[in-house]
Image (cartoon, grey):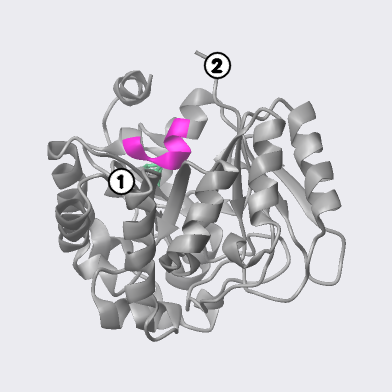
């Protein structure tokens, strides 16, 4: 089996949502199809075989179907990360399927309509995202769910996964990302800084995260959790996105669209390379070598008193990952 070599490419920074915690805030800047092809070629030379188009909202880019076709022509499996709103239009979903899209991540942050619309700042978009999920499943595309952990959904993560596994049993994979509080594109600050009420504390998500993780395992679903330190992932540490990257020595690559300056190619060889923090308790923690710790911005806001050392052998977790 060919080793997965994955990368991300922003196609636009326009977005039809305005999520209160967005880590890639929107602005108007278009890239042409010729430039998209140039960037795909650049990735080809790096041996990339799986390319995820993101944004902003990639379905707001008029060139998305062509970009999907190009990725396939260059021997890559195309994926998108989308809020699913534009996929509520069945004809548009069919167009992407016809272009060769078979796998996508749909981002949705609550199963409760009013919370979801509050988080995206768009009334009616919860219904559209759900419609988008239905359309893609109907078209036999593989749909994964992406969700940002926040102060609202942290109270009911179990109910969230129960809702989706019940209504969409076809969905096999779930991704939970704790809010990115930094400047993901090295330029613009996450919108969570304007909306601090939306940031969940680790102590407030701990129990629900555990329940949701165990529920998914019992249902034989797979999942990943990002930006949560291992001391809050007891028993399911091997599903930490960062720990997996550390164990497998996987890098993160993304081409960001930048505001009023040249776009940026970023490669992180190790998730601990940037904007991370380890506290005093980490020094005595046996998982220190495989944990990415805290996002530095979380530490700036709340300190590190929530961290506690874990006395578990890292080898066991690495073996599970392998
Ligand atoms: S104490 Fe530090 S090293 Fe240990 S699991 Fe928590 S954040 Fe990671």
Residue 246: x percent and y percent?
50, 31
Kind of element beneath mark 2: loop
Residue visible at 17% across and 60% down?
A: 163
Residue visible at 87% across and 60% down?
A: 262
Indicate if the residue with disc 1 has its beta carbon within 8 Å of ligand 1. yes
Which labelled disc corresponds to residue 276? none
Query: Quadrant holding ligand 1?
Result: top left
For residue 199, what is the image quadrant? bottom left
Residue visible at 67% across and 68% down?
A: 13
Indicate left or right for 312 with 41 as reference. Answer: left
Query: Which quarter of the image is occupied by the C terminus?
Result: top left
- Residue closer to the observer: 103 or 227: 103
Which labelled disc corresponds to residue 231? 1
Residue 143: x percent and y percent?
37, 48
- Residue closer to the observer: 123 or 18: 123
Whichever of callouts 2 and 1 sits on the residue coming sooner in the sequence is 2
For residue 177, what is the image quadrant? bottom left
Q: Main secondary structure of the magenta part?
A: helix
Q: Is residue 82 visible?
A: no
Residue 44: x percent and y percent?
75, 30
Q: Which residue is mark 2?
A: 2
Q: Is residue 141 visible?
A: yes
| Residues shaded magenta | 239-244
Q: Is residue 246 above or below residue 177?
A: above
Mark 2 and mark 1: span between their CA atoms? 34 Å
Residue visible at 33% across and 18% down?
A: 319
Q: Residues within 10 Å of mark 2 (few under 14, many from 20)?
A: few
- Residue 240 falls inside the magenta stretch: yes
């Amino acid at each position: 089996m060919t080793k997965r070599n994955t990368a991300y490419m922003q196609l636009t920074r326009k977005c039809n949502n305005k999520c209160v915690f967005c880590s890639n805030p929107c602005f108007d800047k278009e890239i042409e199809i010729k430039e998209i092809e140039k960037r795909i070629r650049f990735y080809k030379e790096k041996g990339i075989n799986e390319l995820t188009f993101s944004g902003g909202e990639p379905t707001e880019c008029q060139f998305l179907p062509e970009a999907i076709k190009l990725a396939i022509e260059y021997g890559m499996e195309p994926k998108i990360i989308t809020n699913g709103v534009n996929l509520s239009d069945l004809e548009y979903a069919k167009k992407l399927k016809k272009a060769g899209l078979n796998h996508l991540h749909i981002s949705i942050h609550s199963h409760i309509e009013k919370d979801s619309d509050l988080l995206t700042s768009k009334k009616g978009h919860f219904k559209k995202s759900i419609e988008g999920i239905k359309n893609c499943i109907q078209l036999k595309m593989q749909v994964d769910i992406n969700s940002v952990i926040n102060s609202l959904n942290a109270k009911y993560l179990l109910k969230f996964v129960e809702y989706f596994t019940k209504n969409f049993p076809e969905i096999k994979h779930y991704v939970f990302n704790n809010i990115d509080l930094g400047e993901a594109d090295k330029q613009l600050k996450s919108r969570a800084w304007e909306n601090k009420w939306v940031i969940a504390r680790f102590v407030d998500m701990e129990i629900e995260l555990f329940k949701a993780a165990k529920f998914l395992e019992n249902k034989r679903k797979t999942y990943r959790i990002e930006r949560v330190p291992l001391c809050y992932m007891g028993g399911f540490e091997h599903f930490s996105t960062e720990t997996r990257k550390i164990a497998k020595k996987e890098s993160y690559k993304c081409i960001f669209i930048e505001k009023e300056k040249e776009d940026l190619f970023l490669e992180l060889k190790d998730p601990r390379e940037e904007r991370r923090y380890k506290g005093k308790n980490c020094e005595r923690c046996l998982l220190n070598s495989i944990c990415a710790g805290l996002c530095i911005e979380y530490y700036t806001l709340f300190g590190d008193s929530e961290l506690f050392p874990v006395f578990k052998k890292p080898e066991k977790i690495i073996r599970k990952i392998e």
